[in-house]
Amino acid sequence: MKDWEIIAHVVEQESVNRAAAVMRLSQPALSRKIMALEEELGVPLFDREGKRLRLTHAGKIYYDFAVKMRTLDQELQESLLRLREGPIPSRLTLGASLTTLQTTLPDLLTGYAEAFPQTEIQVVTGKTHEILTLVKEKRVDLGLIASLAEHDGVWSVPLFDDHLALVLPDGHPLTRQKSIAIQELTGLPMLLFSRGTWFRRLVDELFEAHALNPEVRMEIDSFEAIVRLVPSLGAATLLPMSYLRRSLLETGGLAVRQLPELTRAKRTTSLVFFDEAAASSRWRPLVEKARERLQRIVNPHPPSP
């Protein structure tokens, strides 16, 4: 693995341990590689604060370089791929679960349209188990689902981890508290995503685990509708962090609060495709573009120097 890839992984994973796991290295081995690179460059790339790393000014410059190199490397691999196996498929059918349809699919489609402008893209939507069935039956080329997939005949590539966040209308009494206990969700008027989806099961499992009984005023199958109604109804909601972009929070009259229990309630968004496709490098650019695009959405800003 190239030095710039190592630094990019460490910055984007925000942890040496997590980066080591992604790269299938031991934590000590990864730390030695970073120190060797810093010695070769003659400047520190990170300030060490206990177990936490913070980019130095030199580190920020190097990370910017790494991002550019990743883009160039991707372009190189795509060009070589077209020479070896012909062009990227002229038609791509993408299956998306209901949750990813509203959170990550728009960004993924934008990335694909920019990278593969000659490819016609069609989208099929459904629940997670329906998308998995479509992938296994080869009725879609790729599937985007809000969970890990462990099924025969299906290859799964984890893209990023997501977690729940408490969303309140600006001025809600809970926003004036320094901290919010999970038990305060009991009796709290809430709007929730409709039942039957993986995301709603995650919410219900959280309620059951902590014996919570909120006052559910409405169940809706649209995140957009929920965030529009939260301020007007004065109710709270639980939403995935991947949906809560800065532009939405700045204009939507919303306040977001992180609770430890919600941060631990994680889900993994994955790209899935059938086994035969996994063995072909023809699909690799599509997988790598998804990983690159969605990692940037979830971690839009590297640690500041």
Image (tube, helix red, strand yellow):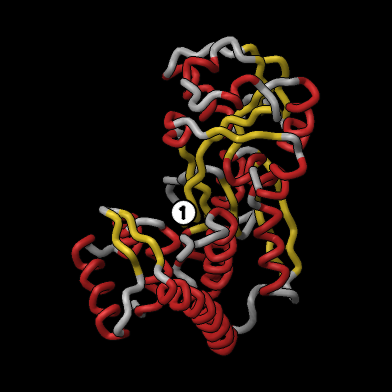
Quadrant of the image for the N terminus?
Answer: bottom left
Can residue 3 be seen in the rendering of this structure? yes
Task: Decide which of 174, 213 is in the foreground and name it.
Answer: 174
Tell me which residue sits at (54%, 86%) in the image: 76
Instruction: State which quadrant residue 244 falls in.
Output: top right
In the rendered image, the quadrant that contains the C terminus is bottom left
Q: What secondary structure is found at the residue carrying circle 1?
A: strand
Q: Is residue 272 above or below residue 171?
A: below
Up/down of 68 relative to 299, above or below: below
> Splitting the image into 4 quarters, where does residue 227 fall?
top right
In this picture, residue 73 sits left or right of residue 225: left
**Which residue is pictured at 54% across the width and 12% down the height?**
186
**Residue 165, relative to residue 304: is it above or below?**
above
Count of marks placed on residues: 1
Percent of width and height locating residue 106: 71, 54
Q: Is residue 198 in sight in this rendering? A: no
Q: Residue at x 58, y 39 (%)?
A: 240
Instruction: State which quadrant residue 222 falls in.
Output: top right
Residue nearest the viewer, comparing 298 with 176 = 176
Q: Residues within 10 Å of mark 1 (few under 14, many from 20)?
A: some
- From the top left corner, tell me how far across and down residue 191 is, in percent: 68, 22
Nearer to the camera, 47 or 14: 47
**Horizontal side of residue 34 vs 4, given as left or right:** left
**Going by the image, does 290 lie left or right of 278?**
right
- The type of residue carrying mark 1 is Pro
Name the residue located 28 percent from the left edge and 72 percent from the top edge.
34
Question: Where residue 204 appears, x then y in whole percent?
Answer: 53, 22
22 vs 28, nearest the viewer:
28
Q: Which residue is mark 1?
A: 158
The location of residue 91, given as percent across then percent down, is 71, 68
